[in-house]
Amino acid sequence: MGCGRMTEQPAGNYYDKYRTRNPVARWLMRGFLDAFDELAGCQPARIGVEIGCGEGELSIRLARAGFRMRGFDIAQAAIVEARARAAAAGVRIDFARAGIDEIEAALRAPLVVCCEVLEHLEEPLAGLDALARIADPWLLVSVPREPLWRVLNVCRGKYLANLGNTPGHVNHWSADGFLKLLATRFQIVAHRRPLPWTMALCRRR
């Protein structure tokens, strides 16, 4: 996502949480996806854009539910994988490499999806401003919930040298803190707290 500076990180997700075989991680992802499906169903748009789409799993999920989707990511390797997964799923989605600054210059969408992206941005308010210019009017957004995210990483023995902080995460919000941030740019219509994330459906002011 190319708004301001983004920390160096691998293409797509740091690990493939959508296809993990870990039973605890799979249980957590079911909660995430249930919340995602619920909030996506709380708004009327059926045309959407996903920013920071990674391997395309959320766009594919929406396309299967009847949405017409496009997906963008700054990592070309992620776009290649997203195209392969969409083809395997039998859905047609236009995936392309682009940063948010490139997208906002030419695109508005009834629904914008931006999940697990803002924690990577060194200028998250600039990112929100860009999302507000693209969303016409709906935004579905999520970030890891802190400090719970890092606590769970420590409990599973991950990233101990960084006190459980996932590589590339430069912003850390509690649920209330993230909702307050969103409220500076959007009207929050509904929110959910699937363990360990904060997720919100917003409408542009």
Image (tube, rainbow, N blue to C red):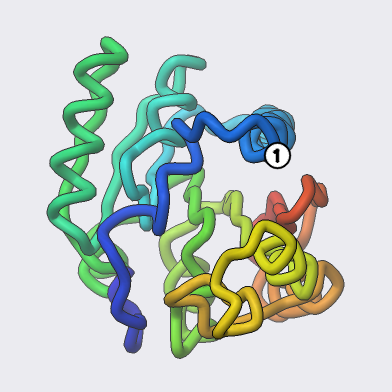
Q: In this view, does 3 lie to the left or right of 178?
A: left
Q: In this view, does 203 lie to the left or right of 94?
A: right
Q: Is residue 60 left or right of residue 71?
A: right
In this orientation, which residue lies closer to the viewer: 35 or 26? 26
Q: Is mark 1 on a helix, strand or loop?
A: helix
Q: Position of residue 32 (x, y in %)?
A: 68, 39
Left or right of 196? Residue 44 is: left
> Which residue is pictured at 78% across the width and 74% down the height?
147
Q: Residue at x 35, y 33 (%)?
A: 69
How many numbered marks have been drawn onto this rendered protein structure? 1
Q: On screen, 135 above or below 18?
A: below
157 or 80, which lies in front? 157
| Residue 42 appears in the figure | no
Where on the picture, by quarter, is residue 43?
A: top right
Q: In this view, does 162 lie above or below 187?
A: below
> Which residue is located at x 52 percent, y 29 percent?
21
Q: Where is residue 143 in the image (x, y as percent from the top left)?
A: 62, 62
Residue 14 spot, x, y in % from top left: 40, 58
Query: Which x, y percent locates residue 44?
Result: 63, 30
Q: Which residue lies furthest to the front in this view?
A: 157
Q: Which residue lies furthest to the right in this view?
A: 176
Quarter that holds the N terminus: bottom left
**In the figure, 81 relative to 161: above or below?**
above
**Which quarter of the image is occupied by the C terminus?**
bottom right
Q: Which residue is drawn at 21% across and 69% down?
A: 102
Under mark 1, the amino acid is Leu
Which residue in the rendered view is the most extreme toward the top? Answer: 90
Residue tagged 1 = 28
Q: Is 23 situated above or below 28? A: above
Q: Residues within 10 Å of mark 1 (few under 14, many from 20)?
A: some
Tell me if residue 197 can be seen: yes
